[in-house]
Amino acid sequence: MILVTGGAGFIGSNFVLDWIASTDEPVVNLDVLSYSGNLRNLASLQRNARHVFVHGDIRDRPLLDRLLADHQPRAIVHLAAESHVDRSIHGPGAFLHTNVEGSFVLLEAARAHWSGLAAGRRESFRFLHVSTDEVFGSLEPEAPAFTETHAYDPSSPYAASKAASDHLARAWHRTYDLPVVTSNCSNNYGPYHFPEKLIPLTIVNALAGEALPVYGDGLQIRDWLHVGDHCRALRAVLERGRVGETYNIGGGNELANIDTVRRVCALLDELQPDPAGPYERLIRLVADRPGHDRRYAIDTRKIERELGWRPTETFETGLRKTVQWYLAHADWVREVQSGSYRDWVAQNYATRTPGPA
Ligand code: NAD
Ligand code: DAU
């Protein structure tokens, strides 16, 4: 049995689905179901006895103690977080509460549980702390990609809160010997991605004939990794990663945002052409994100060398599958766009006057 936090979110639900499909081991999935958590992502597991969903907060220590005592997981995969940079700019408080305080409460509960285990189970226990490349800050155009020892230099409240949680997780290993392994991953994309993030936002806006907002000059570079490859990497880190170590995970797909948006448009032109013309006509350059990091790139040599992991999807194959998934799941999109989603879009883009691309 493993305990996954945030398993109803984008990466979490992909991870849980992948785990159930590729192992025999049950999962307890603890998620507070914030705006980005969606049980519909896990609908296929409704009658699966190996998936136990618990609605709750990682800051709820009595709940954590009860879950750990009842289910005796051999590992915790910690994904629960506030994850959107733009939201962290509008309201940083929630990011500190969940990403910093929540990780602290979870680490403390894990430590209490792990300390009470019998010797063999203590040795094999793992706490996998899932983090981001954003903790490293921005890279110059020609600078080498982030290695695991790159200095931390977070730019956004989101990145700073994740950096803080990384420091806590490592300190809990050094000070208390808690068997922590950390991963820092680049931008994911794929099914169940909440459409506040660049790729799904572009797909859903294009299909609705709405503007495709690109921040600043659109030349910021992100390294895209298909979420399925991230899930396989997390399984490898959990099973074979060395305790106390960090593993960087990335797709080797460095692309300027404007090119990413153009690629999505080209795929949509092919798969669901708009009689009004090519989707690129909808691209608009809008006001930049404050503190916007210019470039991320990940050096994946360590995880390749030590754990034998490498991505299986190219950006071409992964993006095509992703666009096809969104075209086939209009009902999922409709559901997540109801409620507070519209308020967020209005708030985030209200002051971003669009200009031509
Ligand atoms: P997401 O926003 O889609 O999902 C986060 C999940 O956490 C949601 O289901 C939400 O309900 C849950 N959650 C939030 N606060 C909680 C709380 N207090 N208690 C319990 N559950 C809570 O995010 P995501 O994109 O799936 O990211 C998952 C993790 O991976 C995060 O830690 C993020 O920092 C990290 N990460 C994401 C990416 C990416 O590109 N999306 C890349 C690298 C690392
Ligand atoms: O790098 C890993 C990180 O990737 C994760 O830690 C975060 O949880 C995840 O949200 C993602 O962060 P980004 O800020 O890179 O993702 P986002 O999709 O918000 O933006 C991707 C790029 O596109 C970024 O440079 C900002 C830009 N962008 C984004 C939006 C929403 C636009 O140009 N227009 C937009 O409307």
Image (cartoon, rainbow, N blue to C red):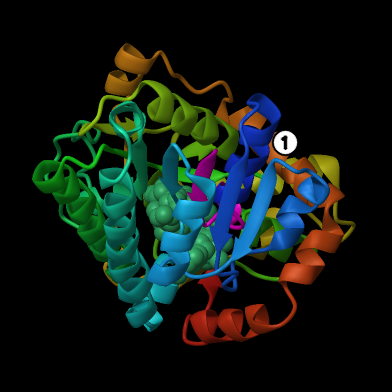
Report the quarter where the N terminus lies: top right
Q: What residue would you read off at disc 1?
A: 321
Task: Classify 10 Å Cα crowding around label 1: few (below 14), some (14-19), many (20 and above).
Answer: some
* The furthest residue to the right: 275
Question: Residue visible at 77% across and 46% down?
Answer: 45
Vertical side of 84 occupied by 22: above or below: above
Q: Position of residue 26 (x, y in %)?
A: 63, 38
Q: Is residue 184 visible?
A: no
Looking at the picture, tell me which residue is in the foreground, 32 or 25: 25
Looking at the picture, tell me which residue is in the foreground, 52 or 307: 52
Looking at the picture, tell me which residue is in the foreground, 130 or 117: 117
Vertical side of 136 occupied by 208: above or below: below
Horizontally, residue 30 falls left or right of residue 175, namely right
Asked if the magenta segment contains residue 4, the reply would be yes
Check disc 1 and report its element: helix, strand or loop.
helix
Horizontally, residue 14 falls left or right of residue 90, namely right
Asked if the magenta segment contains residue 10, the reply would be yes
Q: Is residue 67 visible?
A: yes
Vertical side of 61 occupied by 122: above or below: above
Question: Residue visible at 38% across and 33% down?
Answer: 249
Q: Quadrant of residue 107?
A: bottom left
Q: Position of residue 235 (x, y in %)?
A: 48, 29
Range shown magenta: 1-11
Query: Label 1 CB, ligand 1: below 8 Å?
Result: no
Q: Quadrant of residue 306?
A: top left
Three-letter code for the amino acid on which mark 1 is drawn: Lys
Q: Position of residue 218 (x, y in %)?
A: 43, 56
